[in-house]
Amino acid sequence: MSEGDGETTGVVKKFLFVNRKAPYGTIYALEALEVVLISAAFDQDVSLAFLDDGVYQLVSANNPAGIGMKNFSHTYRALDDYDITKLYVERESLTERGVSEDAFIVPVTVVSRAEMGHIMAAQDVVLSF
């Protein structure tokens, strides 16, 4: 295809995936993680944000065996293999839930609610799960 007939080659978009749900009990967290990995495989600029109960997705001590679900938290360690290194956690969500910054399975950047707004505004695409 030539330029002008609809094909866009080499266009990198900035995607932010916003995770607001607890990691277990619904399919949201696992589905979001799968979409993130697929997006990164297509060489897009991928970032993740964890707000509200989404902060629990990164907690290293998750143990969903009691509800009959498999623990997929270790999959977050694969993000670095896909060059996904921009993981943002909202400070206010941590504070409201009593979660410590050192409880996470992967390195994150903790930002204020206002900073998170700026990060969101700088994206081409924001998808919320």
Image (spheres, rainbow, N blue to C red):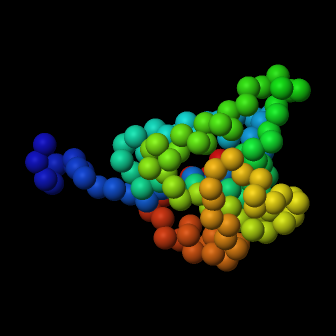
Quarter of image, res 67: top right
Q: Is residue 13 above or below residue 66?
A: below
Q: Nearer the viewer, residue 63 or 124?
A: 63
Quadrant assignment for the N terminus:
top left
Q: Is residue 124 above or below residue 60?
A: below
Residue 96 screen position, x and y as percent:
87, 64
Residue 97: horizontal and vertical position, in percent?
Answer: 87, 58
Q: Residue furthest front?
A: 102
Residue furthest toward the top? 68
Closest to the observer: 20 or 48? Answer: 48
Question: Can residue 17 be seen?
Answer: yes
Residue at 49% across, 51% down: 84
Q: Residue furthest left?
A: 2
**Residue drawn 82% across and 34% down?**
63
Residue 23, by quadrant, is top right
Would residue 126 be seen by someone viewing this image from the given angle?
A: no
Q: Residue at x 25, y 52 (%)?
A: 10
Q: How far across and how far down the image is residue 66, in percent?
A: 89, 26
Q: Is residue 93 left or right of residue 75?
A: right
Residue 67 falls left or right of residue 4: right
Residue 62 x/y as whole percent: 80, 39
- Numbered label tally: 0
Q: Residue at x 79, y 63 (%)?
A: 93
